[in-house]
Amino acid sequence: MSLPLAIIGGYLGAGKTTLVNRLWREPHGRRLTRLVNDLGKVNIDAGLIAAHDGTTLTLTNGCACCQMQEDLTSQLMMLVAQDDLPDAIVIEASGAGEPARLALAGAGIGGLTLTGVFVVADATTLAAKRHDKFVGRLVTRQIAQADLVMLSKTDISPDTGAGTRQLIETMTDAPIIDTCSITDVTALLLAASKNTAATGQPHDISPHDFEPDTTRADALFEHIYFTADTPLAPTALSRVLDKYAGQLTRAKGHTGTHRLQLVDTQWKLTPATRDAVALVFISVRGACNLTALENDLKKDLEEVVVGPAGLEPATKPL
């Protein structure tokens, strides 16, 4: 039996977790194994994953596309060798890495069939990222490595993503699909790749399929992982986010009372109760003083406690 292996890539905040959560919620009846990779010590994305019938495995404290590639290979080998095999494997790459490197991690492992490298592209930010002097090369390589580009957030794009689609067409010959138009994520991600349709043969993983860059994600990005036993009050956190949002590339996780999602200057807090605070903040190296950000968060914890229902801050009595 050959296990389908789908790799989901794309830049930070493009919508990879949202897409894979759609797969997990579909009534496909398959038992899936999901490998999720984050830069922090604890995998924030693992806490944002929808409930499902299957297994979620995490690779943390590094990018599986570079310094943790051997760990990923070992994990895949163990999955293929186990008696109780899943029906398919889905790898959600770190947004700071190249998805082709994940395909290379599975190269030579018998029993795996790559259904495709699927790259999610944000219709609202891709153009700016493509021309950014720091991350433009990474974003360009992510798109170029795609078997299929999945254009996200077209519903909030001023031109419904038309301009971004035209840009992508200059970067790759891969087909492009709007994530809003996908009705069956399971069929799209876990069926045979475009190569099968053309040749009648599965897309076997081969190192010759890709030529990854040698730049490591930790040379381009830096991050901090923030935890606390006391919830962060939304108004206090909002002040910190307003201060640093333009300097951060990505932030996500749980505040104790809310779920945080931040991409560049845009951020959102959604009510979601959780016992502990677990947040990751990512920036291009040197773009944000992450130590100062962490100190501001600690200061807010010292000065503010969460009020009734965890929705309003209350000053601690002197």
Image (cartoon, grey):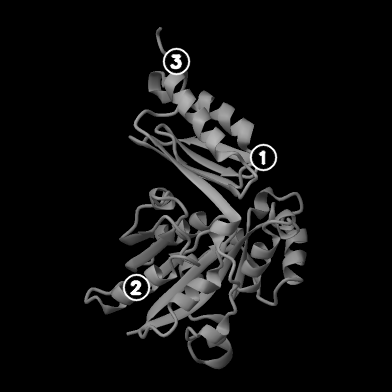
Task: Give the structural element (helix, strand or loop) at label 2.
Answer: helix
User: Where is residue 61 drawn, in percent x and y?
Assistant: 42, 55
Quarter residue 258 falls in: top left
Mark 3 vs mark 1, CA separation in Å: 28 Å
Q: Determine which residue is flagged by label 2.
A: 74
**Position of the N terminus by quadrant:** bottom left
The answer to whether residue 75 is left or right of residue 116 is left
Mark 3 / mark 2, whichever is N-terminal:
2
Q: Determine which residue is flagged by label 3.
A: 314
Frontmost of labels 3 and 1 is 1
How dense is the environment of label 3, judged by Cα within 10 Å: few (below 14), some, or many (20 and up)?
some
Q: Considering only vertical position in the picture, is 53 above or below 266? A: below
Residue under the image location 58 percent in, 75 percent down: 212
Q: How many marks?
A: 3
Q: Determine which residue is flagged by label 1.
A: 246
Q: Nearer the viewer, residue 42 or 124?
A: 42
| 3 and 1 marks in contact (CB < 8 Å) | no
On the question of residue 206 being in view, the answer is yes
What residue type is disc 1 on? Answer: Gly
Residue under the image location 55 percent in, 64 percent down: 216
What residue type is disc 2 on? Answer: Ser
User: Where is residue 105 drawn, in percent x and y?
Assistant: 44, 75
Residue under the image location 56 percent in, 55 percent down: 15
Frontmost of labels 3 and 2 is 2
Task: Give the structural element (helix, strand or loop) at label 3.
Answer: strand
